[in-house]
Amino acid sequence: QPRKIEEIKDFLLTARRKDAKSVKIKKNKDNVKFKVRCSRYLYTLVITDKEKAEKLKQSLPPGIS
Protein backbone atom coordinates (compact mmCIF):
# COMPACT_ATOMS: atom_id res chain seq x y z
CA GLN A 1 0.00 0.00 0.00
CA PRO A 2 1.63 3.28 -1.10
CA ARG A 3 1.83 6.08 1.43
CA LYS A 4 0.50 9.49 0.51
CA ILE A 5 2.55 12.56 1.31
CA GLU A 6 0.66 15.84 1.45
CA GLU A 7 3.50 18.34 1.89
CA ILE A 8 6.30 19.08 -0.56
CA LYS A 9 8.80 19.51 2.26
CA ASP A 10 7.91 16.10 3.67
CA PHE A 11 8.47 14.62 0.24
CA LEU A 12 11.91 16.22 0.02
CA LEU A 13 12.81 14.86 3.44
CA THR A 14 11.69 11.40 2.34
CA ALA A 15 13.64 11.64 -0.92
CA ARG A 16 16.80 12.46 1.06
CA ARG A 17 16.51 9.38 3.25
CA LYS A 18 19.25 6.77 3.02
CA ASP A 19 16.82 4.08 1.90
CA ALA A 20 15.27 6.18 -0.89
CA LYS A 21 16.17 4.35 -4.09
CA SER A 22 14.50 6.19 -6.93
CA VAL A 23 12.05 8.93 -7.80
CA LYS A 24 9.56 8.52 -10.61
CA ILE A 25 7.63 11.44 -12.04
CA LYS A 26 4.31 10.84 -13.78
CA LYS A 27 2.59 13.67 -15.58
CA ASN A 28 -0.93 13.92 -16.86
CA LYS A 29 -2.98 16.92 -17.89
CA ASP A 30 -4.37 17.60 -14.41
CA ASN A 31 -1.46 16.92 -12.11
CA VAL A 32 2.07 15.67 -11.60
CA LYS A 33 2.75 12.66 -9.39
CA PHE A 34 6.07 12.19 -7.66
CA LYS A 35 6.79 8.71 -6.38
CA VAL A 36 9.78 7.88 -4.22
CA ARG A 37 10.71 4.26 -3.56
CA CYS A 38 12.03 3.59 -0.07
CA SER A 39 12.83 0.20 1.41
CA ARG A 40 9.41 -0.35 2.93
CA TYR A 41 6.93 1.88 1.12
CA LEU A 42 6.43 3.73 -2.12
CA TYR A 43 5.55 7.29 -1.18
CA THR A 44 3.44 9.37 -3.53
CA LEU A 45 2.92 13.11 -3.72
CA VAL A 46 0.36 14.63 -6.08
CA ILE A 47 0.86 18.23 -7.20
CA THR A 48 -1.74 20.04 -9.27
CA ASP A 49 0.35 23.20 -9.60
CA LYS A 50 2.72 22.81 -12.57
CA GLU A 51 5.13 25.49 -11.34
CA LYS A 52 5.44 23.89 -7.92
CA ALA A 53 6.10 20.59 -9.63
CA GLU A 54 8.92 22.16 -11.66
CA LYS A 55 10.43 23.67 -8.52
CA LEU A 56 10.26 20.36 -6.74
CA LYS A 57 11.95 18.65 -9.67
CA GLN A 58 14.83 21.14 -9.42
CA SER A 59 15.22 20.64 -5.68
CA LEU A 60 15.35 16.84 -5.70
CA PRO A 61 18.71 15.47 -4.60
CA PRO A 62 20.86 14.75 -7.68
CA GLY A 63 21.43 11.14 -8.63
CA ILE A 64 18.13 9.89 -7.28
CA SER A 65 15.81 10.26 -10.26
Image (cartoon, rainbow, N blue to C red):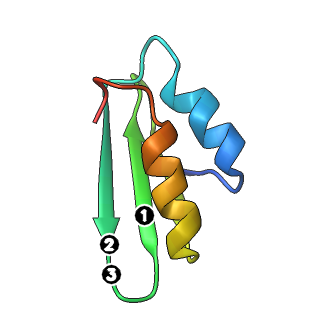
Sequence-wise first label, 2 or 1: 2
Secondary structure at badge 1 equals: strand
Secondary structure at badge 3 equals: loop
Q: Name the amino acid type tagged 1.
A: Lys
Q: Which residue is mark 2?
A: 27
Q: Which numbered tag is attached to residue 14?
A: none
For this orientation, the residue located farthest to the bottom is: 29
Measure how far apart labels 2 and 3 are at the Cα level.
4 Å
- Crowding at label 2, few (<14), some or many (≥20) Cα neighbours within 10 Å? some
Decide: is 50 above or below 40. below
Tell me residue 8's x, y (percent): 66, 49
Tell me residue 32's x, y (percent): 43, 69
Secondary structure at badge 2 equals: strand
Q: Name the amino acid type tagged 3.
A: Asn
Q: Is residue 1 left or right of residue 48?
A: left
Sequence-wise first label, 1 or 3: 3
For this orientation, the residue located farthest to the top is: 18
- Crowding at label 1, few (<14), some or many (≥20) Cα neighbours within 10 Å? some
Q: Name the amino acid type tagged 2.
A: Lys
Q: Is residue 63 visible?
A: yes
**Are dots 2 and 1 in contact, CB under 8 Å?**
yes
Tell me residue 16's x, y (percent): 52, 22
Decide: is 6 above or below 3. below
Q: Which residue is mark 1?
A: 33
Q: Quadrant of residue 38?
A: top left
Residue at 28% across, 23% down: 63
Q: Which numbered tag is attached to residue 28?
A: 3
Tell me residue 5's x, y (percent): 63, 51
**Are dots 2 and 3 in contact, CB under 8 Å?**
yes
